[in-house]
Image (spheres, rainbow, N blue to C red):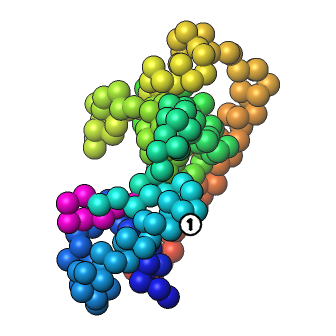
């Protein structure tokens, strides 16, 4: 692999500027040889009208976008990426929206599975936030929806959320009861095994 290719790979991976002496040490060449490789790489980008440029900042080098890309980059950056909500995350969000303020424990009892990841993603997306703590042992965190949730789903307030169909609600409650009964049975069975072993 050529020195230019190695230099390109290093600068791409590092992202920011890298000092000439650091590059020389890493590439096991002299600082002058680093300068020569940088000059050759810079010329290559410009001759081929690539979208990348190599710039020198005092005694350091960095890769950056070509000036001709700026308008397109600004258009792209001005449109923030919308978070992708998986079925699990949407289901968790619906529970929080309808039951808020609600603890992770309550969410997990309704869903029948751990909800740590889904709740964390919703907090990361800015759709859910901490609303305080429940006055109970362990002081569990209470979660609720945010203004971003209302903006994203074009809702004036949680009080205008569409009502659940009674049949759907009955089905959900039946599923929850079934999952809860299974979990309790499994826990009893585990406790019985522990007692037998003792």
- Vertical placement of residue 78 versus 2, above or below: above
Identity of the residue drawn at 43% across and 65% down:
42
The answer to which image quadrant residue 75 occupies is: top right
- Asked if residue 102 lies in the magenta stretch, the reply is no
The answer to which image quadrant residue 82 occupies is: top right
Segment tinted magenta in the rendering:
57-63
The C terminus: image quadrant = bottom left
Of residues 124 and 4, the one drawn nearer to the viewer in this rendering: 4
Identity of the residue drawn at 52% across and 35% down:
71
Taking 118 as reference, is 165 left or right?
Answer: right
- Vertical placement of residue 158 versus 75, above or below: above
Identity of the residue drawn at 53% across and 11% down:
157
Rendering coords of residue 101 (x, y %):
43, 26
Outermost residue, right direction? 167
Q: Residues within 10 Å of mark 1 (few under 14, many from 20)?
A: few
Of residues 1 and 42, the one drawn nearer to the viewer in this rendering: 42
Question: Can you see residue 87?
Answer: yes
Rendering coords of residue 90 (x, y %):
62, 37
Taking 131 as reference, is 76 left or right?
Answer: right
Rendering coords of residue 163 (x, y %):
68, 16
Q: Which residue is mark 1?
A: 189
Question: Can you see residue 10?
Answer: no
Magenta residues, dominant SS class: strand
Disc 1 is placed on an element classified as helix
Identity of the residue drawn at 53% across and 44% down:
69
Rendering coords of residue 5 (x, y %):
47, 78
- Asked if residue 62 lies in the magenta stretch, the reply is yes
How many numbered marks appear?
1
């Amino acid at each position: 692999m050529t020195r230019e290719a190695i230099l390109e790979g290093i600068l791409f991976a590092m992202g920011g500027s890298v000092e000439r002496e650091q590059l020389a040490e890493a590439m096991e060449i002299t600082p002058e040889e680093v300068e020569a490789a940088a000059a050759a790489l810079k010329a290559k980008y410009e001759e081929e009208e690539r979208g990348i440029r190599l710039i020198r900042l005092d005694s350091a080098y960095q890769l950056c976008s070509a000036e001709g890309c700026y308008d397109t980059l600004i258009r792209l950056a001005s449109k923030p990426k919308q978070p992708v909500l998986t079925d699990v995350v949407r289901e968790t969000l619906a529970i929080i929206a309808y039951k808020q303020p609600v603890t992770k424990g309550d969410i997990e009892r309704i869903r029948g599975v751990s909800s740590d990841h889904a709740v964390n993603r919703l907090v990361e997306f800015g759709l859910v936030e901490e609303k305080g703590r429940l006055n109970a042992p362990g002081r569990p965190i209470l979660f609720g929806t945010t203004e971003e949730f209302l903006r994203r789903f074009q809702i004036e307030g949680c009080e205008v959320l569409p009502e659940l169909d009674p049949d759907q609600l009955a089905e959900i409650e039946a599923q929850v009861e079934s999952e809860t009964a299974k979990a309790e049975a499994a826990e009893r069975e585990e406790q019985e095994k522990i007692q037998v072993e003792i």
